[in-house]
Image (spheres, rainbow, N blue to C red):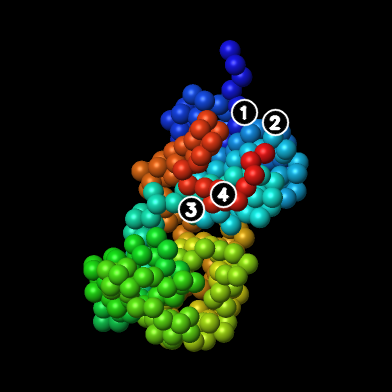
Amino acid sequence: MTQRPPILVTRAVFPEVVASLREHFDVETNDADDIWTPAQLIERLQGKVGALTSGAERIDAALLAACPELRIVSNLAVGYNNFDVPAMTAAGVLGTNAPDVLTETTADFGFALLLATARRLTESEHFLRAGQWKKWGLDLFAGADVHGATLGILGMGRIGQAIAKRAAHGFDMPVIYHNRSRLDSATEAKLDARYVSKNELLQQADHLMLVLPYSAESHHAIAAAEIALMKPTATLINLARGGIVDETALVAALRDRRIAAAGLDVFEGEPKINPALLTVPNVVLTPHIASATLKTRRAMAQLAADNLMAYLTKGAALTPVNAGLIKPR
Ligand code: DGY
């Protein structure tokens, strides 16, 4: 029997996805779902031609130099800020991500987090569970309306557009957005979304949703100066990556009520949480679950596996991030 190419799956994934990989590859899995150090990852990657990663493993020049057989790293995530793309390209290693399949699920969650934050859902539930509810009150946990309020979207890719669609057509919200590149006028008209400068976005939004990719340029895109431009009644929702928001500045702003509330699904240094965030009541915190429905997580895992199969068996991946740039190893 000819030897199958060896690959590594770095985290526990659905058995049927592993089974589909086993039809083509010699697969090493991590059934215990341990979090490996960079050195442990390098050790397990020895001799492997492909890796299916969760999106948290750093793929940089040092790792690539230590793993000369590696040809493709397939992220089970749409975000790929864990990839040093220039280093991968220089090393001839293809990177792939998992777009599209999570768009609608993530947009749903954006609204869940926005509604929970604006309507003080978790704060009021904690109050009730703690036995503190003694009487109904006219302004008890009175929050902010979502319907009809102006939604600002920073980052207008697929997920931003799916959120805009819900906002304009489901919640009757005027939608403004800022993005590196402006949408064409037909798409803007279809979404009923208006392009504004970043400062206008910050100043005009009643609710601000962050859905932009994380990079050196977007690091702390929302810090003290940006928060200072926001309305004191505004809410801030981060679905993208923790590093986009300066959490220290956000905690100070939430404490001083310089903005009304925040909803965060992602954190700087997650899964560790800045302890100060846990002390402010006007923030809703969730553990990076925006794309977490079983159906969607299965589809993401299968797409990540399909990328490995397509590239290693046919030479072309389905959703590459640096194809055309690399000279394959
Ligand atoms: C993504 O796909 O990038 C989500 O944030 C899950 O990691």
Q: Amino acid at mark 2?
A: Gly
Please identify the residue farthest to the top as the structure is shown. Answer: 1
**Front label number (4 vs 3):** 4
Do residues under tags 4 and 2 come within 8 Å of each other at their CB atoms?
no
Secondary element type, mark 4: loop
- Any part of residue 187 in sight: yes
Identify the amino acid type marked 3: Val
Could you tell me if the residues under marks 1 and 2 are in contact, i.e. CB atoms within 8 Å? yes
Residue 78 is labelled as: 3
Q: Hey, which quadrant is residue 29 in on the image?
A: top right
Q: CA distance from mark 1 to mark 4?
A: 24 Å
Whichever of labels 4 and 3 marks the residue nearer the N terminus, that label is 3
Q: Position of residue 269 (x, y in %)?
A: 62, 60
Q: Which residue is mark 2?
A: 47
Q: Amino acid at mark 1?
A: Pro
First in sequence: mark 1 or mark 4? 1
- The foreground one among 325 and 265 is 325
Q: Is mark 1 within 8 Å of ligand 1?
A: no
Q: CA distance from mark 4 to mark 2?
A: 25 Å
Q: Residue at x 55, y 26 (%)?
A: 25
Distance CA(mark 4)–CA(mark 3):
19 Å
Rendered-image quadrant of the N terminus? top right
Secondary structure category for the residue under label 2: loop
